Image (cartoon, rainbow, N blue to C red):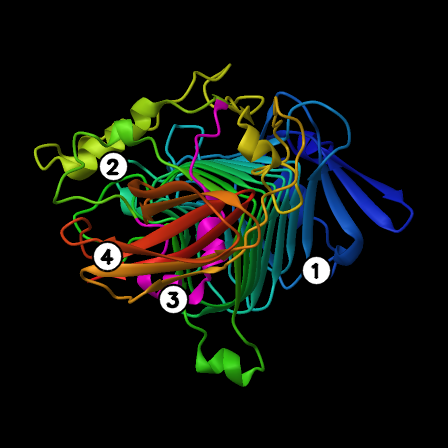
Amino acid sequence: MIFLLMAAFTINVSAQTRYIDVAPGIGTLNTAINGDTTETGERIDPDNTVYRLQRVEDIYYISELIENIDYPLTVVAEDGDGPRPYLALKTDADGNNPGYCFRAKGDLTIKGLHLTLLDDLGAVERRIVRASADNITIIVDDCWFDEASGNAVRIDNIGNNLFLTNSVFSNLGDPSDPDNGRAIDDRGNNIDTLVIEDCTFYNVTSRMIRDGGGYIKYSKVNNSTFVNVGGHRGFDFGVIAGLDFTNNILHNVGFIPRDTASSSAVIMIDPISQELLDMGLTQSINISNNMIFRDTTLMEEYLNDSTIVTQIFNETGLELVNADALSSFYHEDANFENLPSSESLQNLIDYGLDADLLIENTPDWILPEPPNTIYHLDVPFSFNYSNATAATGATHGGQLGDRNWTASSPLGIADAKPFVNNMRVYPTPASSNVNIEFSIENNALVMITVYDLTGKKVSSLINNMYSAGSHRVNWDLSNKLKPGIYLVNMQAGDKTYATKLIVK
């Protein structure tokens, strides 16, 4: 046995990078990392060391917690094709497992890996990566995080930087405990930088980001795809200074109707704090060119006067974004090629809203059978899509969503629509008559439509030709709209104008 463990990894030096090649097996990665020290216990060149795993149909069992205390750790897949190296938890003779894949107490970089918290006896643990030191950086690239009852990443300390790129995150949260499935849980700790780019998230029970307090200095969420995410919340940024939320597809995000709008929104933003202002930061919120769609057929049984679909923004957040951000939400189905079962979502909606059903009896996520009990070679769904708007509607004129998937458009590549704010609605708040003033540069067909914050059209006011110049329309909304916040959207030729209306 000792010989096998010693043979499980070899050291190769290439230029300044020091590679340690690790074979699959029980505890082989643990042995490689823990044993990589001098006789007196110092780490051997951790800044330049890379632990390299094989692309084979076998399992790297983590036999004890991988915890890099005060040194950087880099674990990658070897170059080439083949499945991602698969890391899973191994139970010991007493039935215990390590609990996480990695607990970072120094910088952590992982690339090309497939990690799960489904152990060899079928139990699912809570957190795949846990950040437990101040001011560290975690980089996740080209990975697949699958199966956790709690979080993909939990942050325990302040000042962390988190970069998630080109990766897939799936089946986070137990449907019988829907408030605990979170992609990122900040536990109230201040975050320096949070970047999510070219990633896909699907089947997340509670929310993408749980804000427990603290602040985020800057976050970028760009060209990512989110499917079946967040029972009644999506992205709870909380107090944030800078946010770029662009070119994303949100399909069934905030998918369970609620009996109150309180503390429920797809994107939740709070004003900048005095602490951040004292650092010389100002608040800059850029939200543009995103597609949001909900399959209301799953909710029809419950959509009545006592339930509402989760709104796009919380009321505070709505005050912080401009009308261009609201108008640049496309409300269409992306027409994905192969989505996770809608039955999974229907189960969560039913058990979340039907008082006669016990939430603990909620069926688990409905997934395809893997080739063997816990291992599948690749993501079992396809998020390629054929929606022309999504294929060409990004800020750069290209595709929305995760660019690792294919977007096919029968209309060809086109620039995104220019969004211009050239319309005024008053008075607001309003209770009876509303004036809508607008100006257009050229004669154009003008269409004015009113949406609620779920993206549902509630009124079509105008569909007529107008001459160049300024115009005013009076609208008697008495008894037509419930109190709340609405988006007034105007299409004039090839330009879109928008602003908000508050009805009291």
Q: CA distance from mark 2 to mark 4?
A: 32 Å
Q: Residue at the location (19% across, 30% down)? A: 361
Could one spot residue 154 in this view of the protein?
A: no
SS type, badge 2: loop
Q: Give the vertical position of 174 relative to 192 (above or below).
A: above
Q: CA distance from mark 3 to mark 1?
A: 55 Å
Q: Which residues are magenta?
A: 311-336
Q: Amino acid at mark 3?
A: Glu
Q: CA distance from mark 1 to mark 4?
A: 63 Å
SS type, badge 3: helix
| Front of the two marks 3 and 2 | 3
Q: Earlier in the sequence, mark 2 or mark 4?
A: 2
Residue 345 located left or right of residue 67: left
Q: Give the vertical position of 71 relative to 404 (above or below).
A: below
Quadrant in the rendering for residue 431 = bottom left
Residue where numbered disc 3 is placed: 319
| Quarter of the image that includes the C terminus | bottom left
